[in-house]
């Protein structure tokens, strides 16, 4: 899949088959996250990969809209320092989700509303927090591309020279 198609067809999905994610594909997804640029090239992101059901269930309890994430074979927590930029984490996260889409994998970003809970479950060092969690797996047919809400029209979104 070419890069533009991988970007434009990426929609978030919360439905996954039980098929595990191939190790090689997971490595490629993580590599895509690693290569994202960051402000001042600080490279603040670290990734915690969860595949054990019990661990995913514990993490799912740390968000308000995350009960479904254990269904995904892989959860990736994007971790940054307390004072780190969520923009940097977002670049890594979107890289990983677009790469996953190019590999035929579905994904969705998930918020950890209870950071103390997420820190405890992931055993994070002091001074770190979870910026976002990605749920990744093989899509259930018919549940991904084009199933989400429509985007704001381009001519409503884009202003030229001034607002
Ligand atoms: C920063 C961020 C946090 C999100 N948190 C959650 C979440 O906690 N639970 C969830 O189910 N979806 C979450 N989402 C997914 C959004 O609901 C999704 O991106 C939006 O509905 C667009 O979906 P679409 O690409 O299928 O149109 C989050 C998305 C972003 C960008």
Image (cartoon, grey):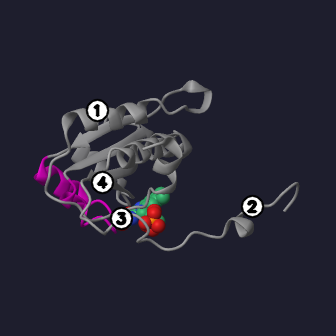
How far apart marks 1 and 4 lie (CA) works out to 15 Å
Viewer-nearest of labels 1 and 4? Answer: 1
Pinpoint residue 93: horizontal percent, then vertical percent: 43, 45
- Mark 3 or 2, nearer chain start: 3
- Name the residue tied to disc 2: 158
Q: Secondary structure at mark 3?
A: loop
Q: Which residue is mark 1?
A: 27
Indicate whether residue 126 is drawn in magenta: no
Q: Which residues are magenta?
A: 52-72
Nearer the observer, disc 3 or disc 2? Answer: 3
Q: Is mark 4 within 8 Å of ligand 1?
A: no
Q: Is residue 128 visible?
A: no
Quote the CA–CA distance across marks 4 and 2: 31 Å
Specify few, some or many for label 2: CA neighbours under 10 Å numbering under 14, 14-19, or 20 or more: few
In reply to whether residue 60 is colored magenta, the answer given is yes
Query: How far apart in space, not on screen, are marks 1 and 2 (Cα)?
Result: 36 Å
Sequence order check, earlier mark of 4 and 3 = 4
Mark in front: 3 vs 1: 3
């Amino acid at each position: 899949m070419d890069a533009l198609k991988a970007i434009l067809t990426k929609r978030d999905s919360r439905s996954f088959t039980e098929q595990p994610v191939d190790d090689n594909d997971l490595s490629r997804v993580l590599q895509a996250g690693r290569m994202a640029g960051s402000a001042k090239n600080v490279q603040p992101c670290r990734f915690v990969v969860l595949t054990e059901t019990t661990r995913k269930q514990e993490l799912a309890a740390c968000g308000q809209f995350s009960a479904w994430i254990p269904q995904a074979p892989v959860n990736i927590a994007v971790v940054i320092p307390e004072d780190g930029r969520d923009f940097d984490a977002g670049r890594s996260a979107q890289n990983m989700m677009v790469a996953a889409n190019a590999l035929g994998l579905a994904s969705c970003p998930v918020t950890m509303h209870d950071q103390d809970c997420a820190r405890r479950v992931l055993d994070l060092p002091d001074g770190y927090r979870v910026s976002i969690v990605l749920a990744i797996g093989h899509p259930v047919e018919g549940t991904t591309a084009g199933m989400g809400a429509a985007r704001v029209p381009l001519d409503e979104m884009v202003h030229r020279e001034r607002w």
